[in-house]
Amino acid sequence: MQDTRIAPYEQLKQKKIKPYEHKAKYYETDQMGIIHHSNYIRWMEEARMDLMDQMGYSYKQLEEAEVVSPVLSVECQYKSMVRFHDTVVIETKLSHYDGIRMTLHYRMTDKETGELRTLAKSEHCFLRAGKPISLKRSYPELDTKFFEMVDEET
C-alpha cells in the first residue's frame, strides 16, 4: 500500500509542544482543601485540546470533520497535592500515534516550586459515525500533523 501522507515520516521533525498551564480553582477543591482527583482528568483534556491548537488543527475542527477522539483508557499517579490557587504546568507528550490510535503522557508540576504533582497517560482512538477510522487514509494532512508531534523519547 502506498503511503498517502503529505511527507514521508522520515523527513519530518518533531515539533516542540509548549507546556499548558492551569491555575487551580476553588471549586476544584474537596472537603480536605486539596484539588479533587477527578479534576486532573479534566486538566489532561485541557492540555490535549491545547496540543491540538498548537498543531494548527483544533478539536473543534476535528468535530467539524465529523471525527471524534474518545478516551479509551486513563492512568493517573498522584505524587503530591495541588491546592487552590496553585498553578500547575502540564507537559503533554504524544508518545504513540499510528493513524488509528494515540497515547499521550502528561507530567504535571508546580509552576513555582517545580515539584512533581502527577504523572498520567491517556489512550484515544479516532471515530467517524461511531466507527474507527484511519486518519492516514481519510485525512492525510491531519495524520501528518499528529505524526509531527510524536515524541519518541517518551
Image (cartoon, helix red, strand yellow):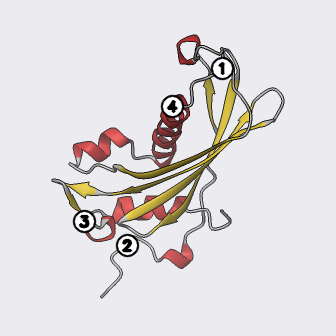
**Between discs 4 and 2, the one toward the N terminus:** 2
**In front of the other: 20 or 13:** 20
**Between discs 3 and 2, the one toward the N terminus:** 2
Given the image, on which type of amino acid does mark 2 rest?
Answer: Arg
Q: CA distance from mark 3 to mark 2?
A: 10 Å
Q: Quadrant of residue 112?
A: top right
Q: Which residue is mark 3?
A: 138
Q: Quadrant of residue 19?
A: top right
Mark 4, secondary structure of its residue: helix
Q: Position of residue 103 (x, y in %)?
A: 50, 59
Q: Contact, CB < 8 Å: mark 3 with mark 4?
A: no
Residue drawn where x is 36% and y is 42% of the image: 59
Residue drawn where x is 37% and y is 72% of the image: 5
Mark 1, secondary structure of its residue: loop
Q: CA distance from mark 4 to mark 2?
A: 37 Å
Q: Contact, CB < 8 Å: mark 3 with mark 1?
A: no
Given the image, on which type of amino acid does mark 1 rest?
Answer: Ile
**In front of the other: 56 or 119:** 119
Q: Which residue is outermost to the bottom?
A: 1
Q: Residues within 10 Å of mark 1 (few under 14, many from 20)?
A: some
In the picture, the disc for residue 34 is 1
Q: Residues within 10 Å of mark 3 (few under 14, many from 20)?
A: few
39 to 140, vertically: above or below: above
Mark 3, secondary structure of its residue: helix
Q: Which residue is mark 4?
A: 38
Q: Which residue is mark 2?
A: 5
Q: Residues within 10 Å of mark 4 (few under 14, many from 20)?
A: few
Given the image, on which type of amino acid does mark 4 rest?
Answer: Ser
Residue 110 shows up from this direction: yes
Residue 18 shows up from this direction: no
